[in-house]
Image (tube, helix red, strand yellow):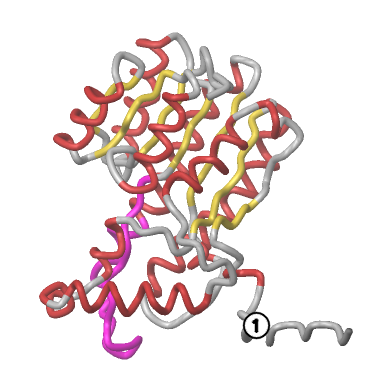
Amino acid sequence: MSGELAGKVTIVTGGASGIGRGIVERFVAEGAKVVIADVQTELGEALAAELGPDAHFHYTDVGDQAQVGRLVDTTVENFGGLHVMVNNAGRSSPMKKGLFYDDFAEFDSVMRINLLGVMAGTRDAARHMAEEGGGSIINISSIGGILAGGGVSTYRASKAAVIQFTKSAAIELAEYEVRVNCIAPGSIPTPILQSAASAEDRERLEKFEARIRQQMRDDRPLKRQGTPGDVAEAVLYFATDRSRYVTGTVLPVDGGTVAGKVMPPRKPKPEPTP
């Protein structure tokens, strides 16, 4: 590791598991002090203990603006600043048989966590960063916010809104040297997929996940499976001075899924005739 984040203070929301955990681990390895903000107390405290004195857990429900504000204030008070904010916390919306069957019962919860949490985290982090010469904010969206598709329509809408909000915030905050960028992961195995299953699906979760994962592989030009570590590498780029002239950008980390349709396998090139 190169210590690119040595002396930097970072918050990672939803940092106790999945992609968030991968980001936390990478940032600590690069020398950052990381605050793991999550509602999963047991997982968050265990991760902080595992990573040592540079990782700290802070219970935070990002759907509650007051808790997000306290998270930022506490981080600044305890560690003397805030240089990088990663708004990663999110949840999926339940899969239904189709749009006709969706009662949107989870709409408020999904939007509050996936969108309001990002908006509040960006605002509160930027308030501090603007007074300290700047900083980097990285919002985690999804390729579901770029590509249309059937199912989980509320989730897709929330992630599309994160992309538009990121670009708008980047324009507004540029005069303060606060950069705002977005990562759109795709086909990364995380626990969030389980929350998209209905009660009936959860009883057959293994078969359900296998079907979804196979569809993701079929749609992905790169056949290597993506990992939370792959997303963490992209987030690290936006967190460092290597991206000091980059803001308002949306970077898919998806094995090429949003680039276009997968081409059929090519026939081997014939050997030249002697």
**Is 205 situated above or below 92?**
below
Magenta span of residues:
89-111
> For the point 27% across and 69% down, which residue is it?
196
Q: Quadrant of residue 271?
A: bottom right
Question: Which residue appears farthest toward the front when viewing the image?
Answer: 274
User: Residue 167: percent from the left, percent from the top?
Assistant: 64, 49
The residue carrying mark 1 is 263
Callout 1: SS: loop
Q: Nearer the viewer, residue 178 or 46?
A: 46
**Is 262 situated above or below 27?**
below
Q: Quadrant of residue 263?
A: bottom right
User: Residue 106: percent from the left, percent from the top?
Assistant: 26, 66
User: Residue 198: percent from the left, percent from the top?
Assistant: 19, 75
Q: Is residue 25 left or right of residue 180?
A: left
Question: Is residue 100 highlighted in magenta?
Answer: yes
> For the point 87% across and 87% down, which residue is it?
273
User: Residue 162: percent from the left, percent from the top?
Assistant: 51, 54
Q: Main secondary structure of the magenta part?
A: loop
Question: Is residue 80 highlighted in magenta?
Answer: no
Q: Residues within 10 Å of mark 1 (few under 14, many from 20)?
A: few
Q: Nearer the viewer, residue 243 or 145?
A: 243
Q: Quadrant of the C terminus?
A: bottom right
**Is 193 situated above or below 34?**
below
Q: Callout 1, which amino acid?
A: Met
